[in-house]
Image: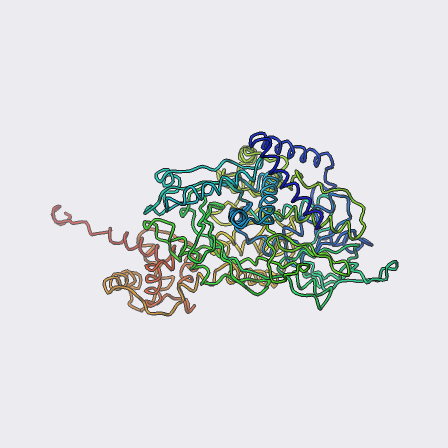
Amino acid sequence: MAFQKAVKGTILVGGGALATVLGLSQFAHYRRKQMNLAYVKAADYISEPVNREPPSREAQLLTLQNTSEFDILVIGGGATGSGCALDAVTRGLKTALVERDDFSSGTSSRSTKLIHGGVRYLQKAIMKLDIEQYRMVKEALHERANLLEIAPHLSAPLPIMLPVYKWWQLPYYWVGIKLYDLVAGSNCLKSSYVLSKSRALEHFPMLQKDKLVGAIVYYDGQHNDARMNLAIALTAARYGAATANYMEVVSLLKKTDPQTGKVRVSGARCKDVLTGQEFDVRAKCVINATGPFTDSVRKMDDKDAAAICQPSAGVHIVMPGYYSPESMGLLDPATSDGRVIFFLPWQKMTIAGTTDTPTDVTPHPIPSEEDINFILNEVRNYLSCDVEVRRGDVLAAWSGIRPLVTDPKSADTQSISRNHVVDISESGLITIAGGKWTTYRSMAEDTINAAIKTHNLKAGPSRTVGLFLQGGKDWSPTLYIRLVQDYGLESEVAQHLAATYGDKAFEVAKMASVTGKRWPIVGVRLVSEFPYIEAEVKYGIKEYACTAVDMISRRTRLAFLNVQAAEEALPRIVELMGRELNWDDHKKQEQLETARKFLYYEMGYKSRSEQLTDRSEISLLPSDIDRYKKRFHKFDADKKGFITIVDVQRVLESINVQMDENTLHEILNEVDLNKNGQVELNEFLQLMSAIQKGRVSGSRLAILMKTAEENLDRRVPIPVDRSCGGF
């Protein structure tokens, strides 16, 4: 491992010297030629997958049970663990992968969604002459280019604006960003450029105008992280790896090596979380790729092992798409406490984050109100005062645990490693920890190299550079047009399917139900404002989805985009999954409750709902209170002090508006704080106060009552005096 890092360092330093001799343009050509050779070399080794489709979960479990011994057993189904499985199986090693939850259920689905080299790391490398930081950036930029190449349907370049508010910062930041381009070399996505104040506002009209000098725009990659992770795992399965989610490692198996007399790790005792069945999975080498849970597996091997993981919580929030341009992100390089905040368009929404605070390791991290408000305050600093940044516009929020590590072999055990660490225990357990999403492939390569050397496995070099992930090989930017033409899907739905499943989108389209409408012909949506369709639920089960949470958070990204929309879609999702997986009524109810709990705690629904349940004093002006009371009493005609669904229906009928009774129940339930089936005057005033403060937005009841009041006011009596009293 140390030798590999030393070689990489030599190449980098040598490259810098070579650039000086050849000149930048010739050096860029040289590096591009090197990259092309690397891709050709990898492509020569890659054969077609052994499976056209990933085997079913049941088939994978049988393989795990009936295989006498694997070469490699990977514990952990995040990006790194899945990458290790893919790297191993494509080298011809007999490979198994187990994950105690779902693939990408942890940190790998809760990232900033960027594929990047790390602008801030390069700044530190230059300012502190830190060669390790430089190597990390260089490696990440190479991996960024590779990931964009092998999964074009799930990733794309994204321009990111760095606004400048002081003249002296303009050349300072420009030099730094240009160096970022230079370090990328032939892997540079697009050249960075400078914008004047007027041009910056043209590209990002909601930007704070006061004191703005100009802006610098650079490029990084963006991806759908959970889907990318799943694509890696599915690709490994297609190449022959036995992969299974909801398989928990209960303990590690050990045996004594007859040649050396040493006790060695020889596999793991695994438990099927869904059925409770336990069995042994034996392997020559076991790899611990469990992210924040690194130390728990290390302690299974050696209860006295020193902890090396230092977990840090990163919170992100999702806001409506109108907060940012469709194709331009924003970087805040110096927040009020020194942290970096990204403000990015993603899935037609806006994502903002991240925080960086110490936390405890937990499988169910919860975003705190403090972190949500920190991000909102930083966003307010950069957006125009014309844009009211409201707490109620936070549609979803989540926390991911970043597994920072200390190198156990380092003399200074307090220093956190900025790069990844491959650790080999006395009993042969290999642990891969640290690193970042972008470098998952190179982390996997280093890990499998260490496994081959330590356990004397017979395998060739890594073959994952240039290896297309599932869905990427035959994808094209115009693939969605064929979906529209061949199947009669809405254009928005077709674009979503192509960008999610790549060339596998046709298989989803074949499962789509007929709508019964003139257009679209097929593709019934799960919820009206998002392009997810019912066929994706059935297809998601083929992709190893086992629970409703899997479906709303990772097979689709509904929970990450809008928790209320996810909750609305849940009953139909559970019904469809129940039909495919033969769930009884008890199982369906259990799935509903578990998924709602997930939305409430882990996706920020609790924080969102608490904005209305706050029992603090109603802060409205007397004139506002009178106005809202009059509006309320137009519904509460009997002066009961509360309104029910019957009252709302009566008013709607009077203005010729029809609304489904179930929908009305949902609308009232959002505001019915004490859940007694009625909305009291105090609850209504609390709602209006929360809306005025920006803590709540998009309340359906408030909008419905305002619209109904306006329609009632328009219905003035027609005068009849000029027609002789109507005779």
Lateral position of residue 7 relative to residue 322, left or right: right
Say how many tags the image has: 0
Q: In the rendered view, how is the structure colored?
A: rainbow
Toward which corner of the image does residue 306 lie, by quadrant? Answer: bottom right
Q: Is residue 159 above or below residue 393?
A: above
Q: Residue at horizontal 54%, vertical 36%?
A: 480
Q: Residue furthest right?
A: 258
Q: Residue at x 66, y 38 (%)?
A: 466
Image coordinates of residue 392 in percent, x first then y, are: 40, 57
* 647 and 284: which is toward the camera: 284
Q: What percent of the width, then of the height, locates residue 252?
A: 75, 62
Q: Nearer the viewer, residue 646 or 416?
A: 416
Residue sitting nearer the eye, 148 or 470: 148
Q: Quadrant of residue 678?
A: bottom left
Side of 204 where 429 appears, left or right: right
Q: Quadrant of residue 498?
A: top right
In the figure, is residue 440 to the left or right of 323?
right
Measured as percent of width and height from the top left, residue 251 is found at: 74, 64
Using the image, determine if residue 106 lies above or below residue 304. Answer: above
Q: Position of residue 475 (x, y in %)?
A: 60, 35
